[in-house]
Amino acid sequence: MKLSVIVPCFNAADTITAQLEALGKQQCLEPWEIIIADNGSTDETVNIVKQYQQIFTNLRLVDASAVKGSAHARNTGASVALSENLAFCDADDEVTSGWVAAMIEALSKHDFVAGCSDYSKLNEPWVVKSCGVREANGVKDYVYFPYAAGNNLGIKRSIHNLVGGFDEKMLLLQDIDYCWRVQKTGIKLESVSNAIIYFRFRNTVKGMYRRCWRLACYDILLHQKHQQMGMPKLIRWRHLSKDAAILPLKFLLKVRNKETFVRWLLDLAWLGGHVQGCLKYNYLTI
């Protein structure tokens, strides 16, 4: 078995069909498998997957409902994988036809890899213009360690096990935490430009705002956790105060249409989430 593709899901009935169809169109002659790790769906997700099991002989469905969150679902899928090579994608995105082959090739050369995203297929143009600059597309540089999104990662199973998998206590940003912990072992995160997925953003302003706020709140928890592992203090109150002072000026100078307004609104959400996270997790660095 050359690759185990792990797809965590929860109430993904509206999108998982498209992802399964995309996985079924892979241009790959090597043996590989799909593991759908269901995190306790209450909609038609499980029934849809069971229908596709009658078509795809390499498709497995596992119960990953014991602990809430995609981290547990990913870990559960990895625990039953038949391959030493693991690849993670999400139920609300769509892999391109060469994704599996690209992941197999990449993991034959490297231990830890990340693919890239295409925003054009699944999102309206205004959504891409509003949100595209905020997402980690491929490997994103950072002053601590680079990172990538968990919807397009590949890794050796032995290394996944070495770091204890994804942190199941983190309901968000567990993918960044995972990337950082893997790299702390000395393993580099490599970019795979031809392992492309079609990424789906939230399609309402409210959904974008709420997601950005929650991510920012968890960002504080993420930094707090890694400061205990040697990460420098990168988020400080004086930085948040500066951002708060600049926001009204940015509104006056940059907001000209729907796209620029949504960008500004997401900046506001990121700031608000950071402030909430500082208070919630007692992160009071000056």
Image (tube, rainbow, N blue to C red):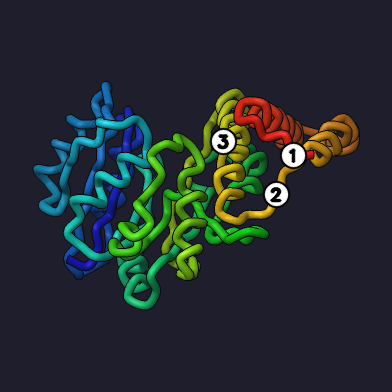
Q: Is residue 47 left or right of residue 174?
A: left
Q: Position of residue 141 (x, y in %)?
A: 62, 61
Q: Which mark is residue 233?
A: 2
Residue nearest the viewer, comparing 19 with 250? 250
- Measured in 3D between alpha carbons, the distance from the residue under mark 2 to the one under mark 3, in whole angstroms, is 16 Å
Q: In the rendered view of the protein, which quadrant contains the C terminus?
A: top right
Residue nearest the viewer, comparing 79 with 126? 79
Q: Is residue 182 visible?
A: yes
Residue depicted at x 45% and y 66%: 185
Q: Position of residue 152 (x, y in %)?
A: 42, 54
Name the residue tied to disc 1. Answer: 285
Instruction: Name which of mark 2 and mark 3 comes first in the sequence.
Output: 3
Instruction: Answer above or below: position of 214 versus 6.
Output: above
Name the residue tied to disc 3. Answer: 218
Secondary structure type for disc 1: loop
Q: Is residue 128 left or right of residue 21?
A: right
**Residue type, mark 2 in image:** Lys
- Measured in 3D between alpha carbons, the distance from the residue under mark 3 to the one under mark 1, in whole angstroms, is 16 Å
**Residue type, mark 1 in image:** Thr
Residue depicted at x 64% and y 45%: 134
Q: Position of residue 108 (x, y in %)?
A: 32, 75
Secondary structure type for disc 3: helix
Residue nearest the viewer, comparing 124 with 222? 222
